């Protein structure tokens, strides 16, 4: 049996109690990479800690895949996928485009998901057949935008500079084909696809926790989210999220052209 939205709300509130008091404050930043910059803060670690504690108490037989505190029970039927702060670079820069991502997989397939942005007061949640946003005390259904061709689309990516040399030509092809490209919104971009404000997100080298909370939100709102070769997005990789299956197919064709 799947959890209800009330449990996701409880997880979001517990995480926000750890993240919001530290946002736009002077916080220590550790670097997880020897070569490069992959920041993590106390807010990341503490938010994931409280999320995991609530899940373990309520669903002790479920597995957990988390960015900051390791994995348990990944061979179980139900696995929670946690990114306590997706967009830590934005978080430490004071930009409110980070979010807490929590997804639930059943036998490897994303069935529920949430992106919570506590500073703006927006919480996007999805279950089979239903995707909603809660803001300002109101809950409203969300629907991605359909009927948009590639040359009419709004595209987002975290940064055009993250694509390695072998992927740059493909990304540049698709960016040159759309009406508008914008950068830097991390998980918030996927929520905007689900809500019908933008049409495409194209990114590379994502981890499962970068996408686990977003797949159900995008797809239950009417969109489609896969890897660049059309495979399942649940394990991360090079990712395309589109507001409609038709636009998604057009984007894949452009990304995989041989010229």
Image: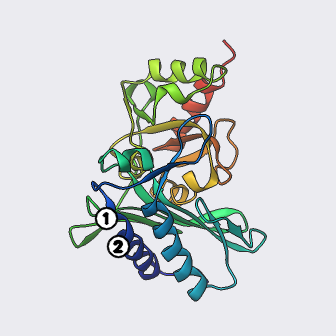
Q: Secondary structure at mark 1?
A: helix
Q: Within 10 Å of the Cα at label 1, are there few (<14), some (14-19), or many (20+) other Cα atoms?
A: some
* Residue at 26% in and 58% down: 120
Position of the C terminus by quadrant: top right
Q: Secondary structure at mark 2?
A: helix
For the question of whether residue 87 can be seen, the reply is: no
- The residue where tag 2 is placed is 17
Q: Measure the alpha-carbon separation of dots 1 and 2.
A: 6 Å
Please state the horizontal and vertical placement of residue 149, each as a whole percent of the image.
Answer: 44, 30
Please state the horizontal and vertical placement of residue 33, each as a whole percent of the image.
Answer: 60, 42
For the question of whether residue 170 can be seen, the reply is: yes
Q: How is the image coloured?
A: rainbow
- The residue where tag 1 is placed is 20
Q: Residue furthest left?
A: 136
* Residue at 75% in and 74% down: 76
Quarter-of-image position of residue 16: bottom left
Judged left or right of residue 198, residue 167 is right
Please state the horizontal and vertical placement of residue 51, each as a whole percent of the image.
Answer: 50, 74
The reply to whether dot 1 and dot 2 touch (C-beta < 8 Å) is yes
Location of residue 223 with respect to 43 vertically, above or below: above
* Residue at 66% in and 25% down: 256
> Which residue is nearer to you in this view: 118 or 93?
93
Disc count in the image?
Answer: 2
* Residue at 52% in and 73% down: 49
């Amino acid at each position: 049996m799947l959890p209800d939205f009330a449990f996701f709300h409880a997880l979001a509130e517990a995480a926000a109690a750890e993240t919001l008091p530290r946002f736009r404050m002077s916080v220590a930043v550790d670097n997880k990479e020897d070569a490069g910059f992959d920041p993590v803060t106390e807010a990341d670690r503490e938010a994931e800690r409280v999320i995991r504690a609530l899940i373990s108490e309520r669903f002790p037989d479920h597995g957990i895949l988390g960015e900051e505190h390791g994995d348990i029970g990944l061979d179980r039927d139900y696995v929670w996928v946690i990114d306590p702060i997706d967009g830590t670079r934005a978080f430490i820069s004071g930009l409110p485009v980070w979010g807490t991502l929590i997804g639930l997989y059943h036998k490897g397939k994303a069935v529920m998901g949430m992106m919570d942005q506590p500073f703006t007061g927006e919480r996007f949640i999805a279950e089979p057949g239903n995707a909603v946003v809660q803001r300002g005390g109101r809950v409203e259904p969300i629907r991605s935008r359909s009927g948009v061709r590639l040359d009419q689309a709004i595209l987002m990516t975290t940064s055009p500079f993250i694509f390695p040399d072998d992927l740059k030509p493909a990304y540049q092809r698709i960016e040159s084909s759309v009406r508008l490209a914008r950068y830097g919104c991390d998980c918030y971009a996927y929520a905007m696809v689900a809500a019908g404000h933008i049409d495409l997100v194209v990114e590379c080298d994502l981890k499962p926790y970068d996408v686990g909370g977003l797949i159900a939100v995008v797809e239950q709102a009417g969109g489609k989210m896969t890897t660049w070769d059309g495979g399942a997005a649940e394990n991360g990789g090079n990712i395309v999220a589109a507001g409609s299956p038709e636009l998604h197919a057009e984007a894949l064709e452009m990304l995989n052209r041989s010229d």
